[in-house]
Image (cartoon, rainbow, N blue to C red):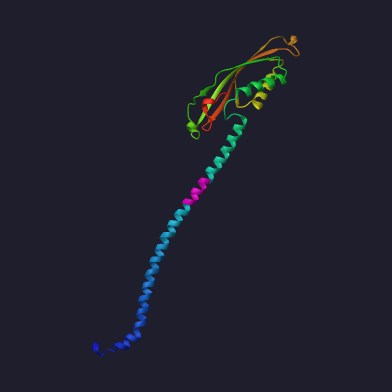
Amino acid sequence: MKLADFDWDYLRKDTLWPTVSALVATVILLASSLFHDRQKELHATYSVNQVSIHADYDELLYRRRLVDRYHRRYDQFQSLGFVGRESRVDWVETIRIAATGMYLPHVSYDIEPQLEVITPVDSVQGGTGIQTYLSKLEMTLGLVHEVDLLRFFQRLETEAPGLMKIDRCSLSRQSGADQALVAGTNIVANCSLMMLSVITSDIDPQVAGS
């Protein structure tokens, strides 16, 4: 049988649509495969981005909690007078009121000039934005009883602005136990105190002391 013997019109009639359908199906299959591969790549990219976004979000929440926590501490220290310019007027007034309220026979003091504290290691979180200042205060107190000294320091620590640290204290009795005065000076206390204050970057250090 020769090619000329085939009825090409009959063959085209029965095979045209199946062939076209097969070609269309092949094209759709290839396109679907390419589309699927592309979507897999996009899904992988989105998954990586989602993990990164979640990590950034968790880091942001952590930093926000740190900021809130340290901001509350900052406000607390500022309200106590530890953060901010040193107020010697308030210190003098607090000493006067405490001594008068406790009926101490005698109180004298001398406040040395304020000095900047040079720390051996800078704070990692504070950096150069924080400066610490120190003022030494020498006090002589006339006491009726030893307990008056503790009560006096408790009042200073509670009512005076800033942070107070007792450096040293020596006591000397002025009379024997059988000669103790009811309202006079039975004990003399010579004490050295340190007043600490912190100046942050939003406060002018040139006017740190007052």
Q: Position of residue 149 (x, y in %)?
A: 67, 19
Q: Is residue 159 above or below residue 175?
A: below
Q: Main secondary structure of the magenta part?
A: helix
Quarter where residue 136 is shown: top right
Q: Nearer the viewer, residue 203 or 139?
A: 203
Instruction: Decide if residue 191 is on the left or right side of residue 47.
Output: right
Q: Is residue 81 left or right of residue 54?
A: right
Magenta stretch? Answer: 52-60
> Is 123 displayed left or right of 161 in the figure?
left
Residue 109 is situated, as x and y percent measured from the top left of the image, at 62, 16
Q: Quadrant of residue 35?
A: bottom left
- Give the residue drawn at x 58%, y 35%: 74
Residue drawn at point x = 39 percent, y = 72 percent: 28
Image quarter (top left, top right, bottom left or bottom right) of the N terminus:
bottom left
Residue toward you, 207 or 184: 207
- Split into 4 quadrants, where in the image is the C terminus? top right
Compare residues 167 and 176 and report the one nearer the observer: 167
At 31% from the left and 88% from the top, the residue drawn is: 9
From this view, report whether residue 16 is shown above or below residue 209.
below
Residue 83 figure quarter: top right
How many numbered circles are shown? 0
Magenta stretch contains residue 147: no
Q: Residue 158: x, y in percent?
A: 66, 27
Residue 110 in the image: above or below residue 83: above
Height in image: 71 above or below 39?
A: above
- The spot of residue 107 in percent (x, y) is 67, 15
